[in-house]
Amino acid sequence: MKSVDSVLREATHTLTFAGCDTPRLDAEVLLAHVLGQDRAWLYAHPEHLPSPRQLSAYRALVSRRAKREPVAYLTGHKEFFGLDFVVTPDVLVPRPETELLVEQALGWAERVPAPLTIADVGTGSGAIAVTLAVHLPGALVVATDTSPAALALARRNAARHGVAGRVHCVQGDLLAPLAGGFSLVVANPPYLSPADLAAAPPEVARWEPRAALDGGPDGLATIRRLLAVASDRLRPDGALLMEIGAGQGAEVLALARRHFPQATVEIAKDYAGLDRMLFLRS
């Protein structure tokens, strides 16, 4: 029999050797998940003896994590903007940098008249769509994706957070299945180039869905297609917010100005000072 403290030290060593960036944190999150507790409980009960079944389940998860499978896929959950989302390998793991897009969208929404109609392009887990619906009670959100599995998960997360009646999931490519003008279009499209994918950590390159990552030869293929069709779906007083890759700002700015010559366009940087988002106001 081994205590919580002992199995955590063992798992941390394993994950350190495997090259994980946050081995102790990963070990704690996985053990808390297996025990049905939070991480604070682990610190309060270092002497606790997990059952043989719990130890077996934990070691299996640690073994999978050592192969660099994302923690979120192992636990089936990921926090985004203070909300808990169910995630599976069918979708990208929601990332902290994408929270900047939500912050900007909420800030913009405070300054425009209701009612708000929002299109979330390539919704994946529904993290952006659901978060916006939760924080904008009067908004109607339409979420698109080409993946039926992703849409099923987005619907599940919308129901989980009580906004299923205002988040409508539609299968299709980009904005193709949608008609009419939207107050706001948001997107976290694929924007990695082959070089980016080759340099990505195993958690990304080996485990996350390639279709949600691969932006074509220069990383801009999907961004180009979205900007080309967005002008027909955006209201005259609307806005478009789109996550981009670090270093893509100048090229995306030029593309946006080509398709929206009368719009106000800017590139927002993340907290590390890297290009992170296109902000376009028509």
Image: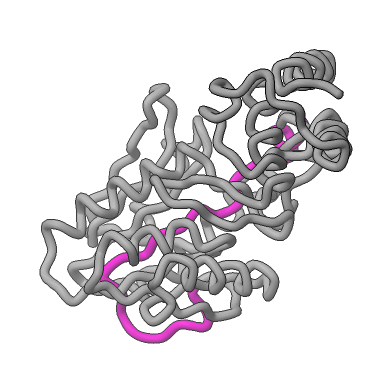
Q: Which residue lies furthest to the bottom in this view?
A: 179
Image coordinates of residue 21 in percent, x first then y, are: 67, 20
> 9 or 80, which lies in front?
9
Quadrant that contains the C terminus: bottom left
The part of the image, by quadrant, that contains residue 267 is top left
Q: Is residue 59 left or right of residue 170?
A: right
Residue at (73% x, 33% y) in the render: 195
Image coordinates of residue 200 in percent, x first then y, are: 71, 31
> 42 or 244, which lies in front?
42
Image coordinates of residue 38 in percent, x first then y, are: 55, 36
The part of the image, by quadrant, that contains residue 259 is bottom left
> 92 or 178, which lies in front?
92
Quadrant that contains the N terminus: top right
Asked whether 106 falls inside the magenta stretch, the response is no
Q: In this view, does 21 lie to the left or right of 252?
A: right
The part of the image, by quadrant, that contains residue 35 is top right
* Number of disc labels: 0
Q: Is residue 222 left or right of residue 6?
A: left
Residue at (69% x, 49% y) in the render: 214
Q: Which colour scheme is used?
A: one colour
| Residue 89 showing in the rendered view | yes
Q: Is residue 7 left or right of residue 166?
A: right
**In this view, 259 is above or below 66:** below
Task: Write down the region rendered in magenta.
Answer: 175-198
| Residue 21 showing in the rendered view | no
Residue at (14% x, 57% y) in the render: 110
